[in-house]
Image (cartoon, rainbow, N blue to C red):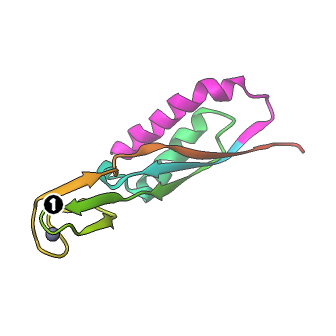
Amino acid sequence: MHELSIAQGIMANLRPWLDDQPENFRVSKIVVKAGPFRAVVPSALVGAWEIVRLDHPKTSGSVVDVDPSFIRVECRDCGHSWDASRAVFACDKCGSDNLEFSGGNELFIEDIKTYTCGE
Ligand SMILES: [Zn+2]
């Protein structure tokens, strides 16, 4: 399940930063930007995070939210261009497979919501 390794990667990235925060610092939400080429199943990542979040007291009550991005597709034959939410193999308009892609490979932490407990 590759979402579990993504969740573990998020934790590995956050851990040094979390360790530097005060004791009463808490993370409530982590927003992950994920492009279609990454094939992240949002519900699987949410579920994986429910396990991994317990590895650190400052994230144990947090949730992950997936913000999907798009692949910009341009047809080299007819010039048609559009945003696709999944990998495509043929032009929407002319059926050509002579396509150019940009974006869609994103996988990063876009936003982190935090709060201070006991205030
Ligand atoms: Zn086309």
Residue displayed at 64% across by 40% down:
59
Task: State ligand 1's quadrant.
Answer: bottom left
Q: Quadrant of residue 18?
A: top right
Seen in the picture, residue 50 relative to 76 is either above or below; the reply is above
Q: Amino acid at mark 1?
A: Arg
Secondary element at image label 1: loop
Tell me: 117 left or right of 27.
right
Does the numbered disc 1 mark a residue whose Cβ is under 8 Å from ligand 1? yes
Check residue 20 for magenta coloring. yes
Residue displayed at 37% across by 59% down:
70
Check residue 84 for magenta coloring. no
Question: Residue at label 1?
Answer: 76
Seen in the picture, residue 70 relative to 28 is either above or below; the reply is below
Rendering coords of residue 112 (x, y %): 63, 45
Most distant residue in the bottom direction: 93
Residue displayed at 33% across by 55% down:
36
Q: Quadrant of residue 94?
A: bottom left
Q: Quadrant of residue 42?
A: bottom left
Question: Which part of the image, by quadrant, shows the N terminus?
Answer: top left
Rendering coords of residue 23 (x, y %): 79, 29
Residue sitting nearer the eye, 99 or 33: 99
What secondary structure is the magenta-colored segment mainly?
helix
Question: Residues in magenta?
Answer: 1-26
Question: Which part of the image, by quadrant, shows the C terminus?
Answer: top right
Residue displayed at 26% across by 60% down:
73
